[in-house]
Each structure stands twice: as structure tokens, then as C-alpha cells.
Image (cartoon, rainbow, N blue to C red):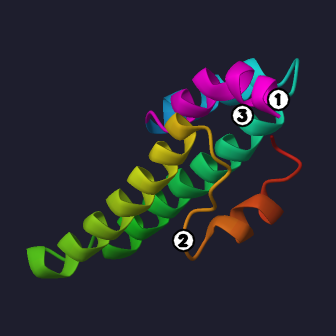
Amino acid sequence: MNQTVEEGKNLAILAYMTLIGTLVAWSLNSEKRNKFSSFHIRQAIGLDLLWILFAVLISGFDQWFLTLPFYIFCSVLWIFGFIGAVQGKLAYIPFFGNYFQKWFKKLA
């Protein structure tokens, strides 16, 4: 497993670098699938889509006290996933990680 982690670590980290990073990591991982990279790519896809969904839902609110908790929540989830990728761990993102793995299993 250590070799799998080391080979996939760069793509796993790249996956958390915005939606573009996720798409690039996904593309680069599609030829020679690495289980570690795939795990973090699925987590990052889920976070990206969650961010977009929440942003669309709260876009009508101009009150910072309504939108700030959303941004803090998503940022904490992102940090959790990013740190897991850097440390070489298969750590599920709280609340949503299991779902992201199930929903995006065929993608990455």
C-alpha cells in the first residue's frame, strides 16, 4: 500500500486544487488508475459539487451571517481532505465522504 500511496500522492493533492485541479487529476489518473488517487479524486469531486450546489442555493442571500457558515463549513471539509492527501491517508470527509465514494465510484 505504501507504494500505491507514494505513486498517487501528487494526483491526490492536485485533486483538491479547485475544480480544474480535480479534472486534471481525474484525467491523468484515468489511464493507470491508482487506488489512493481515485479515493481522493472522488472526495474532491464531491466537495466541488457540494460547493457549487450550496453556492447556488445561498446565492440569493446577501447577508454575510447566512453565507459565512457555509464557506467555513466547506473550507473545513476541504482542509480535512487536503491534509489526508498530504499525509497519505484514506480519510473520509466528515458527513459526506462515504456518499462521495459510492456516488462517484465509476468516475474515478
Write the residue at 54% across / 71% down.
94
Q: Residue at x 73, y 46 (%)?
A: 39
Question: Is the C-beta separation of discs 1 and 3 under 8 Å?
Answer: yes
Quarter of the image that includes the C terminus: top right
Mark 3 lies on residue? 37
Picture quarter with the N terminus: top right
Q: Whole-Å distance between the Cαs marked 1 and 3?
A: 5 Å
Pointer 1 with pointer 2, Cβ within 8 A = no
Give the amino acid at mark 1.
Asn
Horizontal relation, residue 29 to residue 11: left or right: right
Q: Residue at x 30, y 72 (%)?
A: 70
The answer, for residue 63, to whether it is visible in the render is no
Does label 2 or label 3 sit earlier along the sequence?
3
Residue at x 28%, y 64% (from the top left corner): 71
Residue flagged by tag 3: what amino acid is it?
A: Ser
- Sort mark 2 into few (<14), some (14-19) or many (20+) by Cα contacts within 10 Å: few
Is residue 34 one of those drawn in magenta?
no
Q: Quadrant of residue 98?
A: bottom right
Residue 47 image point, x, y percent: 53, 56
Q: Which residue is mark 1?
A: 34
- Of labels 1 and 2, earlier in sequence is 1
Q: Is residue 59 above or below residue 17?
A: below
84 lies above or below 61: above
14 displayed left or right of 34: left
The residue that disc 2 covers is 94
Q: What element does badge 3 sit on? A: helix
Assign a secondary structure to mark 2. Answer: loop
Part of the protein shown in magenta: 1-17
User: Taken as a whole, is the magenta stretch helix, strand or loop?
Assistant: helix
Question: Can residue 3 be seen in this snapshot?
Answer: yes
| 89 sits left or right of 39 in the view | left
Mark 2 → mark 3, Cα distance in angstroms? 19 Å
